[in-house]
Amino acid sequence: MNKVVSLKQVRPLLKDGMSIMIGGFLACGTPQKMIDLLIETNVKNLTIIANDTSYVDRGIGKLIVNGQVKRVVTSHIGTNAETGRLMIEGKMEVELVPQGTLIERIRAAGAGLGGVLTPTGVGTMVEEGKQKFIIEGKEYLLELPIKADLALVYASAVDEIGNAVYYGTTRNFNPIIATAAEIVIVEAENIVKACGLDPNHIVTPGVFVDYIIGEDN
């Protein structure tokens, strides 16, 4: 099944109040065309789940500056002063999650697990309101899975049925979020024919992917 579509075709999927996972690290490996489509549609009250909030003029940062984000679940906001300002002024909720814990919570959702146990955050404000377990004399926090309505993924090469590969650091977060959302849209740098990728290099199987956006869309 050919999953390649236009930006116009996925536009109706974008709704106010959605939870959206976005791949990448400081905009490297972030699906910029889908970010621009979100801005164009001006959907509001979004919950964004991502490694960071990028910069004010790039990637996720543009959504925040445009006033479209109600809540952010992320591990890093230091490169985007607008995120910090809105958080301090109480205009946007920010849940800061240790980076490794964040990706493991997403991975747990994709794997159908009930959560993950981690020592990260024990004895700090991170543990507030969370269950604690003692295993072999060591304390752990129970961190619950994170799922989303939509995952926006960027891949270096994708075949027409959705199998995806990632080059270099563009791989950050992208393969994991592709497993943990109801709808997955992959923005592809290059699209090849079905079975045109070396199966040994495929990271995200096409079964996870619903739609593919190409560079020429």
Image: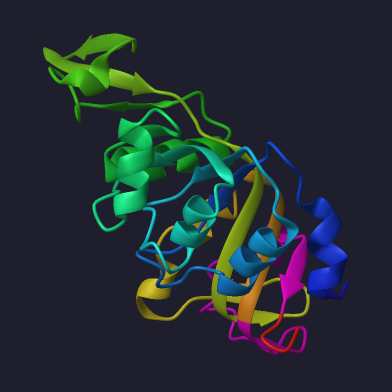
Q: Quadrant of residue 80?
A: bottom left
Front in this rendered view, residue 172 or 59: 59
Q: Quadrant of residue 28?
A: bottom left
Residue at (66, 43) in percent of width and height: 44
Residue at (30, 43) in percent of width and height: 84
Q: Quadrant of the C terminus?
A: bottom right
Residue at (72, 75) in percent of width and height: 213
Which SS type dominates the magenta stretch?
loop
Extreme residue in the front direction: 89
> Can the viewer see residue 96 in this picture?
no
Judge whether 105 appears above or below 81 on screen: above
**Residue 158 at x, y = what percent?**
65, 79
- Left/right of residue 36 with respect to residue 1 in the rendered view: left
**Colouring:** rainbow
**Residue 81 at x, y = what percent?**
29, 52
**Residue 169 at x, y = what percent?**
35, 73
Judge whether 203 appears above or below 95 on screen: below
**Residue 211 at x, y = what percent?**
77, 65
Q: Quadrant of residue 7?
A: bottom right
Q: What is the magenta range? A: 189-213
Front in this rendered view, residue 29 or 201: 29
Q: Quadrant of the N terminus?
A: bottom right
Judge whether 92 appears above or below 39 on screen: above
Front in this rendered view, residue 189 or 135: 189
- Left/right of residue 69 with respect to residue 162 in the rendered view: left
- Left/right of residue 28 with respect to residue 12 in the rendered view: left
> Can the viewer see residue 39 in this picture?
yes
Residue 198 magenta-highlighted:
yes
